Image: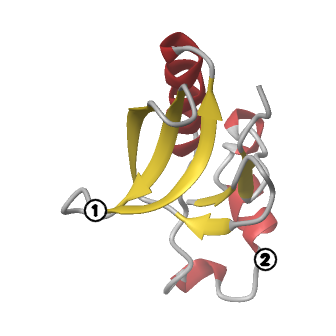
């Protein structure tokens, strides 16, 4: 998923997240990491552990809340747009429209 960093200077494609306490900044930081837990970048820092977990929960809901519709080989839907396909599947009312980029909260 794409995430804009708290300071707005980075747009990262993230799949793994870690919360770590930074003694230097006296904050709980949410970091983007790879599968081997190597850190790839700071996404945001928060004053309390609880707030960092709240933000991580928001990210989780953002990921889990999406409905994925494959765009390959819609035999009966070849000439239909994605929105027409969704309407024809009668699930449009269950889809929450989310922006394509999650923005880390300032506080």
Query: Can residue 64 be seen by looking at this rendering?
Result: no
Determine whether, in the image, residue 70 is placed left or right of residue 89.
left
Query: Few, some or many C-alpha atoms within 10 Å of disc 2 (few <14, some 14-19, many ≥20)?
Result: few
> Residue 47 lies in what quarter of the image?
top right
Q: CA distance from mark 1 to mark 2?
A: 40 Å
Determine whether, in the image, residue 44 is placed left or right of residue 97.
left
| Residue sitting at the far left | 36
Name the spot of residue 19 as percent of width and height, x first.
41, 34
Choose mark 1 or mark 2, whichever is in front.
Answer: 1
As displayed, is residue 68 above or below residue 64?
below
Name the residue rendered at 52%, 44% in the picture. Answer: 63
Determine whether, in the image, residue 38 is placed left or right of residue 6.
left
As displayed, is residue 52 above or below residue 87?
above
Which corner quadrant holds the C terminus?
top right
Name the residue rendered at 56%, 14% in the picture. Answer: 48
Name the spot of residue 10 as percent of width and height, x first.
70, 66
Query: Few, some or many C-alpha atoms within 10 Å of disc 1 (few <14, some 14-19, many ≥20)?
Result: few
Name the spot of residue 83 as percent of width and height, x first.
80, 64
Numbered marks: total: 2
Q: Are marks 1 and 2 in contact (CB under 8 Å)?
A: no
Which corner quadrant holds the N terminus?
bottom right
SS label for mark 2? loop
Determine whether, in the image, residue 39 is placed left or right of residue 78.
left
Name the residue rendered at 49%, 61% in the picture. Answer: 14
Report the disc number at residue 81. Answer: 2
As displayed, is residue 78 above or below residue 13?
below
First in sequence: mark 1 vs mark 2:
1
Name the residue rendered at 59%, 80% in the picture. Answer: 76
Q: Which residue is mark 1?
A: 38
């Amino acid at each position: 998923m794409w995430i804009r960093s708290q300071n707005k200077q980075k747009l990262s494609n993230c799949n793994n997240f870690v919360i770590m306490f930074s003694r230097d900044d006296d904050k709980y930081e949410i970091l983007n990491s790879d599968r081997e837990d190597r850190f790839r970048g700071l996404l945001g820092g928060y004053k309390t552990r609880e707030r960092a977990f709240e933000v991580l929960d928001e990210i989780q809901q953002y990921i889990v809340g999406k409905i994925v519709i494959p765009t390959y080989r819609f035999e009966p839907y070849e000439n239909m747009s994605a929105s027409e396909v969704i309407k024809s599947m009668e699930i449009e009312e269950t889809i929450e429209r989310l922006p394509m980029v999650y923005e880390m909260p300032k506080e």
